[in-house]
Image (tube, rainbow, N blue to C red):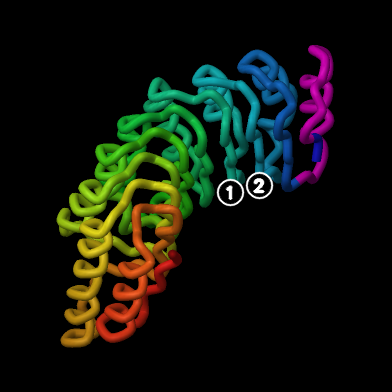
Amino acid sequence: VLSGNHLDASAPPLIGSAIEHSKILTMRLEDMGFTADSIDDFLDHGAAETQDLQVMVLNNNPVGDEGLTIIAECLSIGLTDLSLSKCGLTCESQATLLNLVSLSPNLRSLDLSCNDLGPTGCADMVSWMTHNDKDTFSLRSLELSGCGLGDEGFLRLVPILGSLNFLGVRKNGITSQGVEAVMQSQKMIKLQSLDLEGNLIGESGVHSLTERFQQEHKRSLWNPKQLTSMIDTVILSNNNVAPALAQSTEAFLKIHNPLMTVVW
């Protein structure tokens, strides 16, 4: 753990070189002032060549889109978890994110929260995942909270909701209209957890969500072997949901979809 230490220009290549011959599995490098140039020095001098590194946390470093390109090209094939929250990424990283996921066969968890990706930042990555069997990639947890997705960006993620286990889209300006569009898409949704905290979802969005999965639950009872959509846990705290609506929805779910948990 080196988080919080701001290094002078000579340090990144020296640390990277030392890591090359180590057995380090996890590196926490948060808030260290890494830029595209210094992360290039760091990765080119060893860290990229170790086959043991599995987890890298680079949150709150201004590496930007250029730095992400370097990271995507250099990281070890054994990487399973990568966190790049607050790293100054934009929609210009669209192609790089595709490369990162498609060339990292063991990457299970990717945190891109609090970057200005906008509605289209993940479009290439989603397209690639959609056109490849889920067994050809490992990504199952995607954190996109605070990325400026809006309703459009949320809808663009629909094709991969059958591949992920977790999707985090907190504080993205998602409205009831966005939830309705996703629920009406009739695409397969198989999530363990969907985090929608801190958006702008109201009554019509809640109704759309519960009705979609009530129908799916009913279908599964009639034909248990039929593959149906399901979300185990939906987090809706800090949305435009009145207490009375939450209570009535809970009563509805207990009868019509007892397997779904909603966090208010």
Q: Amino acid at mark 2?
A: Gln
The image quadrant that residue 173 belongs to is top left
Frontmost residue, 177 versus 218 = 177
**Residue lying at 25% horizontally and 52% vertically, measured from the top left:** 179
Left of 44 or right of it: where is 97? left
Vertical comparison of 182 with 227: above or below: above
Vertical comparison of 90 with 169: above or below: above
Whether residue 236 appears in magenta in the rendering, the answer is no
**Residue lying at 30% horizontally and 75% vertically, measured from the top left:** 248
Alpha-carbon distance for marks 2 and 1?
A: 5 Å
Numbered disc total? 2
Instruction: Identify residue for label 1.
Output: 80
Give the SS element for disc 2.
loop
Left of 27 or right of it: where is 141? left
Give the SS element for disc 1.
loop
Residue numbers of the magenta segment: 3-24
Instruction: Find residue 102 and report its horizontal and vertical position in percent.
Output: 42, 39
Q: Quadrant of the N terminus?
A: top right
Whether residue 14 appears in magenta in the rendering, the answer is yes
